[in-house]
Structures are given as C-alpha cells and as structure tokens.
Amino acid sequence: MTDAQETAADSSLRTTGGAPPDDGGSSDAGAPTPLLEPREGIPPVISDADALVQVATALAAGSGPVAVDAERASGYRYGQRAYLVQLRREGAGTALIDPAACPDLSGLGQALSGVEWVLHAATQDLPCLREIGMTPTALFDTELAGRLAGFPRVGLGAMVEGVLGFVLEKGHSAVDWSTRPLPEPWLRYAALDVELLVDLRDALEKELDRQGKLEWALQEFDAIASAPPPEPRKDPWRRTSGMHKVRRRRQLAVVRELWQARDRIAQRRDVSPGKVLPDAAIVQAALSTPANVHALAALNGFGHRMGRRQLEQWQAAVDRALALDDSELPQSGQPVTGPPPPRAWADKDPAAAARLAAAKAAVSALAERLNMPQENLVAPDAVRRLCWEPPRSVDPESVGAALEGYGARPWQVEQVSPVLAGALSVGRV
C-alpha cells in the first residue's frame, strides 16, 4: 500500500458511512471502498464577497498543494464557463464557490499564487478558470501523470480506484451545473472530486519517480502552466458535424450563414447552440438549399415543432447565402500550412511516405518500451512535419533542434531524436 492509500484508508469510517471493514480498506479483500461523504461534510457554497475573502484567506494559510476542479454546463449553456469551482487544501478543508454569484476570483487566484495546483485533465479546466481570474503558476496534472506512468485508464474515477482503492460516484458529471440552487447530491459529488486529488498526486509522483519519469512530467506540467491562452479558432463553422458531406462552395456558404445565425441566437439566449438548431439540420439545409420556408419545413430538424417565425429566420440565413456573389463564397478547404494529408504522400512524395512509415514504427516501438501513449512521447504533427521536410543533416542533434522548433520538451528531444534520426535516413544513399 502506498502512503496515499494509507492516508485514504485511515478515513474509511467517513467514506463508507459506517464502521471500517476488518481489513481497514474495503468490505471484501481487494475490493475498492465507496467514497460516500466528504470528510468534513458538504461545505456551504460561497456566493458573496465576504465569504469569498474568508475562504481565500483560509486556503492561503493552508499547507501543501491545493486541489482544484471546475464544473461547466456543457451541452446546456453557451460557452464553457465555470458554474462551480471546488478547492481543497490541507489545513483549510474543501471550498465550493459559485462563480455565477462571484464572477471575479482573481483575489483567490492571487492568494494561491506560488502554490502548486493539482488538477485532473488541466487543459480542460484552465480556460474557464482563466475567465474568472484564476491562473496557476505551478501545477500537477494527475491525468497526464497517469498517461506518462502507463496507466491504461486515466479518468479520475479509474485513477482513484486503481491507485488509492476508492470508488468515486460519477453519476452527476454531465448534469446542468448552471442549475440554482444546486442539489445536495451534486454538491456532494463535486466536493468528493477534490477529496483525494492531492493523495492521488502524491502517489503518482512516487510512481513517476520510481519509473524515472518524474522530471519528464514536471517539464510537461511547466509547459501547460506557461502556455498562452489558445488563439480563437478560425472559421469555427467548419467544425459543424457532418461537414464532410458538404462539397460545393454555395452549400458551404449556407452552413456558414446558418451556423453564425445560430451562434448569435445561442449567445443571446445563453443556451448550447445544439439546443437552438442541431448540426444535422444545418448540413441538411446546406445540401438541399431550400428556396422557401415551405421547403425548409420539410427537412429533418425543421419539423412541425418549429414556429413560423423561427423558420423564417433560418430561411433568411439560407437566402443570404444563396444571394452571395461567387467571389464571396467560402473556399472548399482551409489554407494548408503544413504537410498534405498522409494518405496523399505515396503519390506526392514516395520517399517522404517511406520516412513517415519508418518514423511511426520507431516511435511506436519506443512508446511501448517506455510504457506511454505515442502522442505523449512526441506530437504526431511534429513527426509528420519532420518526415515531409527533414533537416539537411539527419543526425540526432539536427533532428532535436527541429523538434524543439515544433515545441518538443527537452525530455522528448532526448528520447525521440535518436530513433527519428534513424527513420529519416530511410532511402538516403
């Protein structure tokens, strides 16, 4: 049993809701223990400025890393903002904060400056935390740590069960967190999500150290913490599900107009765009290019439940696309800034295709040897770019310099450069 397991086992009384089992950890030998209640109970939700100052002071006075999580209302509300923030730190206990009532948490973020934040799948939560003024200066990502350590399942529930021997109840992960007031079972679930996060972090740190990968993980965490916010996606309408069916530029214009009209309505109503109009309906309208409201109403997604006024607004978007001059129509594809799709390499550059095949095999073998996913060992896009346009010299130093230019961390350069140098030599005389 790891130190983290021992710490968790010590609290078996409150996790099981009764007397601890005879074996000190579970009711059956080797069976995981259900985690039913936070050790100090469900804390009150912080929803005013005075209470926020108090909890920030308490967390700042705590010790060790702070566990951080956020709940969004994906699929219910527009955007990806946080509707509940959970934190836990030794000496301060657990705090649940309502960002709808307290939209500026920059003071809390400043109170925790210099403290290591422990998150699970940090890149998912960091954007919504930044929106409310919370940005870590140092972090530990337990999901990424699990990947680097070679765990086959890296969801929070699977990690807590596999590493610490406790079962987290995950039934409320996809609920509408914008609901107010939040039901008690949801708050219990939210508090339990940070209950053992620091324990999990400690156990994973020891495992990474045992495997000789701790420094690698720290480099990855530093890269996440120091990464700038991502640039807004260009032409987001092109990510409409089913776009592969849309080929003609006029049809693409219909998708664009409908997507933009839907986005404006969804933002104004603060609902998920899919609840305003499904992607499938947008694609169906683009393929059919209906000439009037009657033709539009006959399409899937624009049925009898949609009122005349709604139909008219969607038909107006279609009409705008149909009225565009040819010079105003979107191009069939986005400008390509990197190599062509790998499926085209055999025809365009057979030597590059051979290099890519060799590189994939080499990276796959190395990833298996290191017991981690290939995409965590080296970014697939960096491998493709190297194979399409290799450096003049394919020695490890030159390959390493190219990898650094594509954003690879020092540990990745050290591990991958020698095998990629060998792969890039394929076919050279």
Image: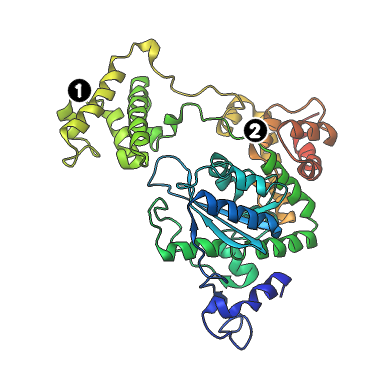
Position of 80 relative to 16 (above/below): above
Task: Identify the residue at the far bottom of this view.
Answer: 22
Position of 52 relative to 153 (above/below): above
Quadrant hosting residue 406:
top right
- The residue under label 1 is 291
Position of 258 relative to 92 (above/below): above
Residue shown at 16%/40% (left/top)? 304
Q: Residues within 10 Å of mark 2 (few under 14, many from 20)?
A: many
User: Disc 2 vs disc 1: Cβ atoms closer than 8 Å?
Assistant: no
Residue shown at 73%/71% (left/top)? 3
Instruction: Name the foreground residue: 410 vs 82.
Output: 82
Residue shown at 51%/73% (left/top)? 36
Specify whether 19 is left or right of 91: left
The picture places residue 323, in percent across and down from the top left corner, at 28, 14
Q: How is the structure coloured here? A: rainbow
The picture places residue 69, in percent across and down from the top left corner, at 56, 54
Q: Amino acid under label 2? A: Ala
Quadrant hosting residue 175:
bottom left
Residue 353 - label? 2
Q: Amino acid under label 1? A: Ala
